Image (cartoon, rainbow, N blue to C red):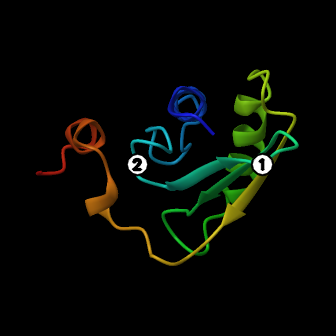
Amino acid sequence: MDEALKENILGALEQVIDPEIGIDIVNLGLVYDVDLDENGKAIVTMTLTTMGCPLGGIISDQVKIALSDIPEVKDTEVKIVWNPPWSKNMMSRYAKIALGIPD
């Protein structure tokens, strides 16, 4: 996958907002990797802020919807992983400022 397409996918994922926190999943540092296979299947490897997050299914559905507008993406698979565990250190500077967390 070329860098422009990867940036396009990450840009689309910035539209997916964590409903509990109010910040997008990219700036929260929840998206670990994105890939596109030869059949146009996007594979999004990500985590959630907590292991018992009740909104995981909703966020996964929103990821699929966000990527459905990208012509190269024919299908989307969301892989939820727990390693490495998410921490506030993974958040972007923007997210930390928005949430009032010292950098």
Residue 84 appears at what percent x and percent y? 45, 76
Residue 72 appears at what percent x and percent y? 78, 27
Q: Which residue appears at 53% of the width and 35% of the height?
A: 10
Residue 94 appears at what percent x and percent y? 26, 35
Residue 53 appears at what percent x and percent y? 61, 65
Q: Viewer-nearest of labels 2 and 1?
A: 1
Element type at mark 2: loop
Of callouts 2 and 1, which one flags the residue occurring earlier in the amino acid sequence? Answer: 2
Q: Which residue appears at 48% of the width and 38% of the height?
A: 24
Disc number placed over residue 37 in the picture, else none: 1
State left or right for residue 41 relative to residue 80. right
State left or right for residue 39 relative to residue 80. right
The reply to whether dot 2 and dot 1 touch (C-beta < 8 Å) is: no
Disc number placed over residue 28 in the picture, else none: 2
What's the amino acid at mark 2?
Leu
Q: Quadrant of the N terminus?
A: top right
Q: Which residue appears at 51% of the width and 33% of the height?
A: 3
Element type at mark 1: loop
